[in-house]
Image: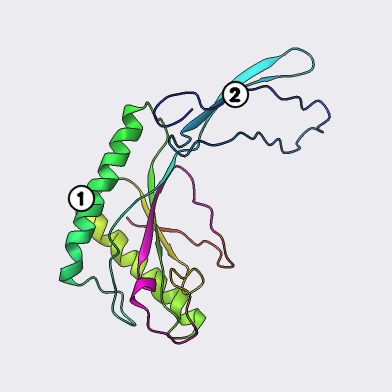
Amino acid sequence: FGESGSMLHEGEEEFSNKKPGAQIVLTWRPRASDPVAFVDYIVQATDGATFTGKVDVWQVRVPHEEVNFETDSAEIRPSERPKLEDSIQVIQREVAKYKKNKGTGVIKLFITGRTDTVGTPAYNLTLSRRRAQSIARWFRQSGLRIPILYDGVGESMLRVKTDDEVDELRNRGADYDLSLTEPRRSGKTRAAWKKVP
């Protein structure tokens, strides 16, 4: 089912050749106009026993104006605060929409910090985590009450591809994801989410 409550796909698949404990993968063709919110399923065993379940898979990448950080800084400048205030409004609207559509999961905000290529990869990973933490704390201090987690990817997921040691403003920022589970991450950096109290 999609966010609108409409059914996106209905089907039946046979898995009698699977061994106990094996992963079962169900697929369907997504519709971009209505993102997937949850999956209802019915499983019937070969002996006729059945059970039903629901998997809440809702996730939203929060559109926002980028909070730009100065080189080698995790400080949120006063000029950037209106961008965060606008983001809180978007986050609250998405949370309300999820609840209106009878979502039952615990929504979490995941903030992923990024850097440009100035500095070593190890240093930039730490800096990106500090940037995500700054934004996470700002959201919490500004009244956002849902669970907030933060992490960073350093220079491993550049918005704008550059050579090493290039000062690029568009790479110094963060991504915001509302999700019930940890967002999938591409790249080599393992997630190390930390929760803001």
| 154 lies above or below 20 | below
Q: SS class of the residue under badge 1? A: loop
At a point 26% along the width and 43% down the height, the residue shown is: 92
Q: Which mark is residue 124?
A: none
The amino acid beneath tag 2 is: Tyr
Q: Which color mode does the image show? A: rainbow
Rendering coords of residue 107 (x, y %): 38, 41
Q: Is residue 173 magenta?
A: yes
Rendering coords of residue 121 (x, y %): 51, 80
Q: Is residue 131 magenta?
A: no
Q: Label 2: which residue? A: 41
Q: Label 1: which residue? A: 143
At a point 28% along the width and 71% down the height, the residue shown is: 68
| 104 lies above or below 93 | above
| 182 lies above or below 111 | above
Q: Residues within 10 Å of mark 1 (few under 14, many from 20)?
A: few
* Direction from residue 183 to residue 83 in the image, left or right: left
Of the numbered discs 1 and 2, the one sitting upstream in the chain is 2
Residue 77, by quadrant, is bottom left
* Direction from residue 97 to residue 17 in the image, left or right: right
The boundaries of the magenta stretch are 163-185
Q: SS class of the residue under badge 2? A: strand
Rendering coords of residue 98 (x, y %): 35, 34
The amino acid beneath tag 1 is: Gly
Front residue of 50 and 169? 169
Rendering coords of residue 7 (x, y %): 49, 23
User: How far apart, in angstroms, are the residues tagged by discs 1 and 2?
Assistant: 37 Å
Front of the two marks 1 and 2: 2
